């Protein structure tokens, strides 16, 4: 048996790790770092998640059950928050893709590392990390929607999403997407120019790394299956020992079968370690980069708006001049606000992702050492027992 | 007897000197591959006689034993029939078919030339396949320096692959008939050798060479462990003489090779028609057990193959991941994270090598063990078959004797001049019957002893492999621990 002195689950990503050391005073009544998605219950096609969080007052816990629709509801509402200046500049905490049983291949590929486990644990962890990020965000955590999501016994999003829900963000982006291409838009700000390039390369590289890692994990799982198969087949070689020669041979077969079984367990553990630490870390890194990419794109759109407004103001006939100028001023102010927020967000996410990767790497490394130590010990014991006390040539029983 | 070996494909010097031979070979080679391979010859699992029979027949549309070498069919011979009793093939290469063995085979002192003259197809024999690599095998025998068989405690000899096959042929001819389990030699492989000959310096041809070297080492060890075989003069010559006459008729596609295949078909027919009344249940039980074991081992070998395959895949995927980690590290702004990622890439490259090594252990220890035993079981089946043949012969002699006696009775009445002749015949036959009975008893005894030894050795072999395998597992884990412990501070240093 593999005994490991491991914590029940790896420590949650605390908001101070994710978000930096901001002093957070949200109206949220729960402590962000205690938010966990503890399990996923399956009822046919429906997947329900149990979310537990500690009250700030220290008087107890909230237990709520939510489906993916509820998470989506939350995310959509975050996108359409009013009274948040420069909201376009926020790098929104990335929500993992929808997970479902017997999902089509495309969806499974989307989920990548989150879908490799035997259980829903990695996926739950990713959802939990998302909630913690939202709860720990100075601007986003103030929304009532988050409070409702985490504390209300009634699920918030079960009613159909109103068609009229004004998702400013996507609308704005859509409008401009249909317009002229923006990739080539030169940035006025050096910081953002380099940031855009950097983000572009990191997005691709982190995705590639995550995919390679996924392949490693999947191969490990295949090895586990092959070992199990072999162990089972070996058992069939064991015959009732009527003669001593046969009996000893059967014992050998049983021995090899045991070794194979333990090899299977070892590889399974390694795969589990991989997914729950570095796997989750790489997955989150990918999603962070994507989220930043979207934010940078929105900012670029704002830049284009500004440039359009400036051009209009220049060309405006005297009658419309004042209005155009007003528009231009508004666009300028908007763009500045967005840029200010964007810069902060870039710094925030940079701190967050470094922290996430650090923790992932450290924890991964520690678990590898633990698993390897315990396996080495087990196999060494088997070796000593099998060799027998004296290094004699004859077979020991 | 301890055997170390290392095989090196001949370096460029060696290859040059053999180029002429190689060219000869290549011409044949072209014939081989420009024709159409009409018959897939992988008889992997089915040992049904009907299958082998029909296959042989389809190869020789006109089954004529006058076998001229103008056969233009491309034959992919019995190369990749890896687990299907190749020892039978080699057995027949150097001597007459066992269906009518010379009576003197029982004594192990057969002169060499006797073996080559019987096969009339030898004149048309082509140049033996010059396997283009030498194997240096060091046979060191410290414990047995007192043994008078060996001239010196240590000997280094260079041998070709065909030499091994030749040795096996001789041993098989001499000993299989009388029930000794002669270990089967590794198979020829046209595909593998062609790669090596073409001079490809890639991992697959290196792997092939290493696989063959290891197989030959195991073969030799197993043969030398056999107390009777060890005393054989040919084995001793093989181990000690610096020069060895070239083994002929080991080439798969020569006249002798084709003769082999036809004889095998003939054998198959014979076996199908023999129904032995077994008086000894021990043999029946054992045969059944070995049949079962054969099936089990083949299944296991399949399973293990897939494990080895996945392990190699893991190695490849780890390498790919290492590369992407390195690229990520290069693009990373944060210095400590960048360094950690680069370190990670380096560690993963080392881990890749570990996986590769583990795959090697999986293969060379476990898979090859199973394969060896599957082939050995082929030998076991061979000796059982041989016993059945001897029994058949005895029955035939008995029948003939009876006929002659009946005829003599008649003659007694009618033609007294022929009586003497008849009586002589009968006396001769009675001698033959007696010899036959002795042979049958002898082979039964020998087989019992051999199986007993086989089962003991089996336990030793498996035990040895288990120990080595466990050692490899422990070593891998310990290496992993070292690598990760070295990496951990780097990871922690990210701030």
Image: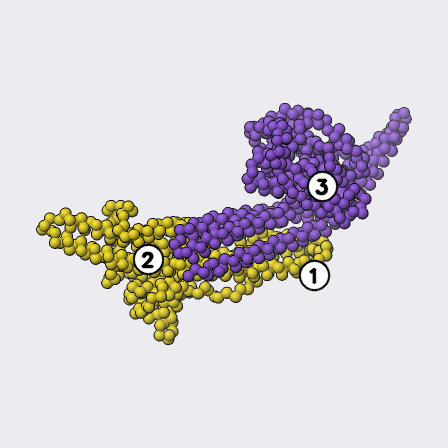
The residue drawn where x is 52% and y is 66% is A5
Q: Which residue is mark 3?
A: B156
Q: Which mark is residue A389?
A: 1
Camera-side residue of B311 and B59: B311
Q: Secondary structure at mark 1?
A: loop
Camera-side residue of B96 and B251: B251
Asked if disc 1 and disc 2 are in contact, CB closer than 8 Å, the reply is no
Expressed as whole percent of the image width and height from the top left, the position of residue A125 reads 41, 61
* Left-right relation of B261 to A320: right
Camera-side residue of B144 and B235: B144
Q: Chain of mark 3?
A: B
Determine the image quadrant of residue B53.
top right
Locate the C terminus of chain B by quadrant: bottom left
Above or below, comparing residue B410 to residue B326 in the picture: above
Labels 1 and 2 share a subunit: yes
Separation of residues labelled 3 and 1 (CA atoms): 36 Å
* Left-right relation of B192 to B100: left
Q: Point out the frontmost of discs 1 and 2.
A: 2
Q: Which residue is mark 2?
A: A346
The residue drawn where x is 55% and y is 28% is B34
Q: Say whether disc 1 or disc 2 marks the residue closer to the N-terminus.
A: 2
Determine the image quadrant of residue B433.
top right
Q: Which chain is yellow?
A: A
Asked if disc 3 and disc 1 are in contact, CB closer than 8 Å, the reply is no
Determine the image quadrant of residue B98.
top right
Q: Which chain is purple?
A: B
Expressed as whole percent of the image width and height from the top left, the position of residue B489 reads 48, 60
Camera-side residue of A17 and A389: A17
Separation of residues labelled 1 and 2 (CA atoms): 64 Å
């Amino acid at each position: 048996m593999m005994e490991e002195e491991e914590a029940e689950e790896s420590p949650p990503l605390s908001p101070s790790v994710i978000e930096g050391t901001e002093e957070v005073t949200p109206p949220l009544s729960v402590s962000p770092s205690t938010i966990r998605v503890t399990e996923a219950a399956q009822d046919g096609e429906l997947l329900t998640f149990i979310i537990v969080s500690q009250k700030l007052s220290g008087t107890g816990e909230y237990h709520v059950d939510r489906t993916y629709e509820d998470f989506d509801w939350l995310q959509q509402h975050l996108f359409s928050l009013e009274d948040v200046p420069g909201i376009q500049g926020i790098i929104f905490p990335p929500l993992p893709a929808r997970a479902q049983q017997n999902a089509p291949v495309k969806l499974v590929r989307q989920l990548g590392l989150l879908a490799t486990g035997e259980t829903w644990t990695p996926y739950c962890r990713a959802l939990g990390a998302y909630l913690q990020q939202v709860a720990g965000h100075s601007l986003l955590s103030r929304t009532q929607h988050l409070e409702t999501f985490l504390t209300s016994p009634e699920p918030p999003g079960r009613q159909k999403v109103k068609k009229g829900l004004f998702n400013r963000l996507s609308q704005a982006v859509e409008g401009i997407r249909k317009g002229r291409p923006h990739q080539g838009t030169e940035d006025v700000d050096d910081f953002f120019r380099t940031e855009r390039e950097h983000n572009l390369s990191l997005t691709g590289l982190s995705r590639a790394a995550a995919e390679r890692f996924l392949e490693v994990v999947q191969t490990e799982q295949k090895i586990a299956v092959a070992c199990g198969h072999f162990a089972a087949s070996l058992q069939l070689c064991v015959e009732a020992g009527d003669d001593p020669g046969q009996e000893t041979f059967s014992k050998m077969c049983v021995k090899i079968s045991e070794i194979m079984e333990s090899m299977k367990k070892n590889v399974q553990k390694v795969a589990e370690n991989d997914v729950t630490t570095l796997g989750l870390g790489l997955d989150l890194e990918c999603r962070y980069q994507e989220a930043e990419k979207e934010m940078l794109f929105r900012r670029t759109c704002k830049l284009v708006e500004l440039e359009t407004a400036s051009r209009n103001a220049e060309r405006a006939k005297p009658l419309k001049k004042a209005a155009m100028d007003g528009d231009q001023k508004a666009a300028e102010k908007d763009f500045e606000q967005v840029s200010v927020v964007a810069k902060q967000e870039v710094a925030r996410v940079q701190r967050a992702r470094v922290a996430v990767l650090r923790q992932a790497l450290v924890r991964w490394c520690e678990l590898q050492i633990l698993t390897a130590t315990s396996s080495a010990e087990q196999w060494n014991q088997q070796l000593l027992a099998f060799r027998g006390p004296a290094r004699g040539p004859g077979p020991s029983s | 007897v301890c055997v170390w070996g290392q095989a090196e494909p001949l370096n460029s010097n060696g290859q040059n000197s053999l180029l002429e031979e190689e060219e000869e070979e290549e011409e044949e080679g072209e014939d081989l591959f420009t024709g159409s391979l009409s018959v897939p010859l992988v008889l992997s699992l089915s040992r049904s006689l009907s299958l082998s029979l029909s296959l042989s027949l389809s190869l020789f549309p006109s089954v004529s034993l006058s076998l001229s070498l103008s056969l233009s069919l491309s034959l992919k011979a019995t190369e990749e029939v890896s687990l299907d009793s190749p020892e039978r093939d080699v057995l027949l290469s150097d001597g007459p078919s066992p269906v009518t063995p010379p009576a003197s085979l029982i004594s192990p002192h057969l002169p060499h030339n006797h073996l080559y003259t019987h096969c009339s197809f030898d004149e048309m024999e082509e140049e033996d396949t010059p396997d283009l690599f030498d194997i240096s095998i060091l046979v060191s025998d410290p414990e047995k320096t007192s043994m008078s068989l060996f001239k010196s405690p240590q000997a280094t000899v260079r041998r070709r692959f065909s030499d091994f096959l030749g040795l096996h042929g001789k041993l098989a001819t001499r000993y299989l008939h009388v029930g000794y389990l002669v270990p089967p030699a590794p198979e020829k492989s046209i595909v593998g050798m062609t790669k090596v000959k073409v001079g490809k310096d890639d991992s697959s041809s290196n792997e092939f060479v290493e696989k063959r070297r290891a197989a030959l080492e195991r073969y030799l060890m197993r043969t030398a462990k056999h107390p009777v075989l060890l005393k054989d003069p040919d084995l001793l010559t093989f181990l000690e003489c610096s020069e060895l006459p070239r083994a002929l008729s080991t080439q798969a596609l020569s006249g002798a090779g084709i003769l082999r295949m036809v004889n095998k078909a003939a054998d198959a027919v014979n076996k199908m028609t023999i129904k032995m009344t077994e008086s000894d249940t021990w043999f029946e039980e054992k045969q059944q057990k070995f049949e079962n074991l054969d099936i089990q081992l083949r299944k296991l070998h399949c399973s293990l193959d897939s494990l080895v395959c996945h392990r190699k895949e893991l190695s490849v995927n780890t390498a790919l991941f290492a590369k992407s980690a390195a690229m990520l590290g290069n693009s990373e702004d944060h210095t400590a994270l960048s360094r950690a990622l680069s370190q990670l890439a380096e560690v993963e490259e080392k881990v890749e090598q570990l996986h590769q090594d583990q795959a090697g252990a999986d293969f060379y220890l476990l898979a090859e063990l199973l394969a060896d035993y599957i082939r050995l079981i082929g030998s076991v089946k061979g000796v059982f078959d041989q016993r059945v043949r001897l029994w058949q012969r005895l029955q035939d002699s008995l029948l003939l004797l009876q006929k002659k006696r009946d005829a003599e009775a008649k003659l007694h009445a009618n033609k007294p001049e022929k009586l003497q002749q008849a009586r002589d015949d009968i006396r001769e036959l009675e001698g033959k019957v007696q010899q036959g009975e002795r042979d049958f008893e002898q082979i039964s005894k020998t087989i019992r002893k051999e199986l007993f030894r086989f089962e003991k050795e089996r336990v030793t072999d498996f035990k040895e492999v288990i120990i080595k395998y466990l050692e490899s597992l422990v070593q891998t884990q310990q290496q992993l621990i070292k690598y990760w412990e070295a990496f951990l501070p780097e990871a922690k240093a990210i701030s």
